[in-house]
Image (spheres, rainbow, N blue to C red):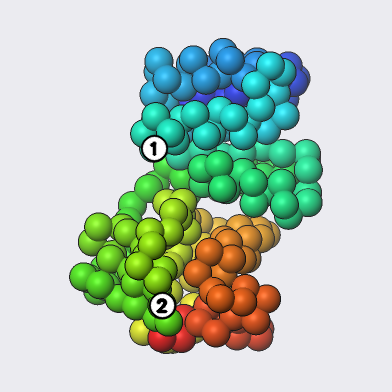
Amino acid sequence: MAHILVVEDNVDLAFGLRTILEFEGHEVDVADDGPSGLDAARAARPDLVILDLMLPAKSGYDILRELRTRGERMPVLILTARSEERDVVMGFDSGADDYVTKPFSTLELLARVRALLRRARPHATDVDGAEGFGDVEVDVAARVVRRAGEVVELTPKEFDLLAALLGRRGAVASRNELLSEVWQYGNADVATRTVDVHIAELRRKLESDPSNPEHILTVRKAGYRLKA
């Protein structure tokens, strides 16, 4: 059983989420606006926050940034009615760990909740010390990334994804393998662009030309690999 905070101003959706999660055995609190959601997250420090981005008084983006600035590391699953990639990217940049776009299925939501609650480190444990490619240096033990000597801020999942690619020493990783390893998704049939969005963010932050990457490469119909 986990303690989950749902921050959602749609009464019917919040009720549905509470019902689904309580049926799974979780303890659930609900907040219906931004300020009360932020207060509840600070006070209760739940195991997981399910956060709508469009909230009264204070947006989900603002809540995320404030939580991360204060050092709160609980996983956050964002809910958004917006399907445009830039809105999802803004959520990840603010500190989100995953997202679902409304409307979503119960099975998909529960799969993502289970994955976020299993926050084990990636299986690429053979990566140790400092690794590098191009002008990027990755200190896996310290979870620090530098590009041209300057620290690059990665979200926890961005770093875990990078570590998973490093651990393969240039071998290809499929999307399903990365979903299982980094997000602990047990159901490979779950349709998600989570990996693709995170790869795009890694390229934006670490590649000289993100539209023509030299190191974080797509292998058509296979997945991704890291070229040192």
Residue drawn at x 35%, y 67% as measured from the top left: 149
- Can the viewer see residue 15? no
Q: Position of residue 5 (x, y in %)?
A: 51, 24
Residue drawn at x 62%, y 73% as measured from the top left: 210
Residue where numbered disc 1 is placed:
73
In the displayed structure, 3 sits above or below 124; it is above
Which mark is first along the chain, 1 or 2? Answer: 1
Q: Is residue 14 left or right of residue 49?
A: right
- Tell me the amino acid under the disc marked 2: Asp
Q: Position of residue 57 (x, y in %)?
A: 69, 16
Residue where numbered disc 2 is placed:
135
Residue drawn at x 45%, y 64% as measured from the top left: 161
Mark 2 or 1, which is nearer the eye? Answer: 2
**Which quadrant of the rendered structure holds the N terminus?**
top left
Q: Is residue 43 left or right of residue 209?
A: left
Asked if the residues shown at circle 2 and circle 1 are in contact, with their CB atoms under 8 angstroms apart, the answer is: no
Q: Quadrant of residue 80?
A: top right
- Tell me the amino acid under the disc marked 1: Arg
Q: Quadrant of residue 74?
A: top left
Q: Quadrant of residue 211?
A: bottom right
